[in-house]
Amino acid sequence: MTFDVAAPPAGESWLDRFARVMGRIVPDAISASVLLLIPLVAYALALGNSPVKTLDAYYQGLWMLLPFTMQMTLIVVLSSVLGATPLFKKGISSLARLPRTRTEVVALAVLATATAAYFYWGLGIAVTPLIAIHFASEAQRKHIDVDFLFLLALLWAANACWQYGLSSTAALLMATPGHFLEKTTGVLPLSTTIWSPAAILQEVGFVAILIALGVTLMPKRCRPVSEFPDARKLIDELPADGSPLQSFSEQLEHTPLVPAVLCLALAGWLYQHFAIRGLGLDINSMNTVLLLLCLVLHRTVHRFSAALQQGVVSAWPVIVIYHLYGGVAGLIQHTTVGEALAAMVASVSTPYTFPTLAAVSGAVVAAFVPSSGGQWVIQGFVTSQAAVDVGVSVQRGLLALGVGDHMGNLTSPFWYAIVAGIARVNFRDFYGYGLIFAAFWFALGVIVFTIAPC
C-alpha cells in the first residue's frame, strides 16, 4: 500500500499535507470494531473460559442494548429534525452575519457549536455543518479568508463539549435508575460527574484552546465554501408546503392543532418528571425535550414528517453497531475478562497515574468502538472496578475515560462520516485536521482529571 504525497498543491502547509496523508489511512468503522472482538475472544479462552461460556457471554451482550440503541437512534434522528427547523437556520444565519474579522468568525462559530453540543450532543452534530457553511459563506461575502474544510474540522472538535455536557451518554446512563452497572456502582448524580469542577474546567479550557488554534493554524491557501456547491445547498430555505389542501386528512396534517395536543402531553410528562417527582436529567427525558422542541418548531405534522424522513438517513450507523458493542461488552462482563483487565489496570495504577491510564485505554478502545455510549458499555465495568481498587472515585474514572473516548471520536472515521454526510463533503478531506485538535484535548484532559477535584 502506498500513499502519494509528492507534488503537493501550491501553497500547501505542513498541516494541509498532514491532513491529506491521514485522510488516506482511515479504516472502515464497522470492520475496525470487529477487530476488537477477535483478541477478546482469544483472551477469554486463554483465561480458562470454555468456548460455550464465551459464546453465551457474547450472546448475552449482543441484545442487551435494544432500549439503549433505540434511545441513541432517536437522539440522532430528532437532532437532525431539530436542525432542519426554520428557526435554527435563521438563528444561525443571523449569528453568521455578526463577525467582521477572522478571529471573530472562528470565536463565534466555535462558541455557538460548543453551546449546542453542550446542551445536546446530537444537536451539536446536526448544526455543525450548518454553522460551518453559514459562517464560511458570510466570511467569503465579506472577503475574510476562512478555509471551509478547516472550519468544519474545528467545529467538529468543538463538539467535545458534549462529553461533559447535558447529554453526556455515560453520565446520563449512570444517573438513570436501573442502568447496567447499578449493582456495582449505584446511581451517580450528575452533580458528581459532568457538573464537577474538573469537568467544567475541561470544557472551558478546551474551547479557549480551540479558538486560539483556529486563528493561528488557519490554512493560508483557503478553500471557500463556494468550491463545495452541494454543501451550499444545505442553507437554502425549506420548501413550501405544496399545493392547496383537498382532503380532510391533508388538512389534518397541515394544522398545528394535532402537534399542539401532543406537545401538551409531552410538557405535562416533563413537568411531572422534573417538578413533581424531582427526578434528574436522563436519556429518556432528554429525548422527550427534543421531541417537544421538534413539534413546536415544525408546527405541523406535515413539516415534521418531511424532516423526519430526511433525519432517519443519518441514523444508520447506530442501528446495528451498538449491538456489536453489546456483544463485546458481554464478553467482558460475563466472563473473567473484565476482572482480569481491571486487575491489570489496578496493578500498574496509583491515584495519580490512574486517570492517564484510563484515558489511554479509552483512546485505544475508541479506535475500534467509535461511540461514546458503546464504549462506556464495554469499558464501564472494568473502569469502575479498577477505580475502586486503586482508591479513587468511580466518577474520576468515568470522566478520565471520557478524555480517551473523545480522543477516539476525534480520530475515528465513524463520526467524521456522519458530519461529512450531512455537510455533503468527503470526510477524508478534513479528517487530518481533527487529529491535531485531538492531541490538545487529550493533553488538557489528563492534566485536569489528575489534579482537579471530581
Image: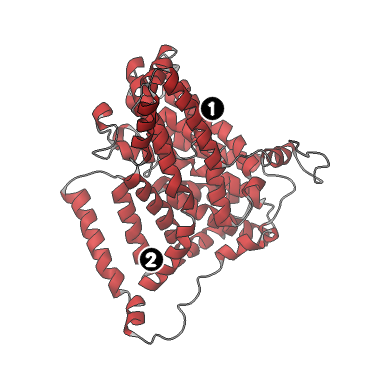
Image point (49%, 55%), residue name = 314
Q: Quadrant of residue 24?
A: top right
Q: Which residue position is annotated with label 2?
A: 297
57 left or right of 441?
Answer: left
Q: Which mark is residue 246?
A: none
Vertical position of residue 5 compared to residue 141: above or below: above
Q: Nearer the viewer, residue 363 or 100?
A: 363
Position of 356 with respect to 227 (left or right) is left
User: Could you say where residue 191 lies in the image, as x and y percent from the top left?
Assistant: 30, 35
Q: Nearer the viewer, residue 424 or 99?
A: 424
Measuring from the top left, give residue 281's x and y in whole percent.
29, 45
Amino acid on which disc 1 is placed = Ala
At label 2, counting other C-alpha atoms closer than 10 Å, the crowd grade (few under 14, some 14-19, many 20 or more) is some
Q: Identify which amino acid the numbered label 2 is placed on.
A: Leu
| Residue found at x 65% / y 46% | 428
Quadrant in which the C terminus is drawn: top left
Residue beneath label 1, please? 443
Q: CA distance from mark 2 to mark 1?
A: 40 Å
Q: Which corner quadrant holds the N terminus?
A: top right
Inspect this view and state whether residue 197 appears: no
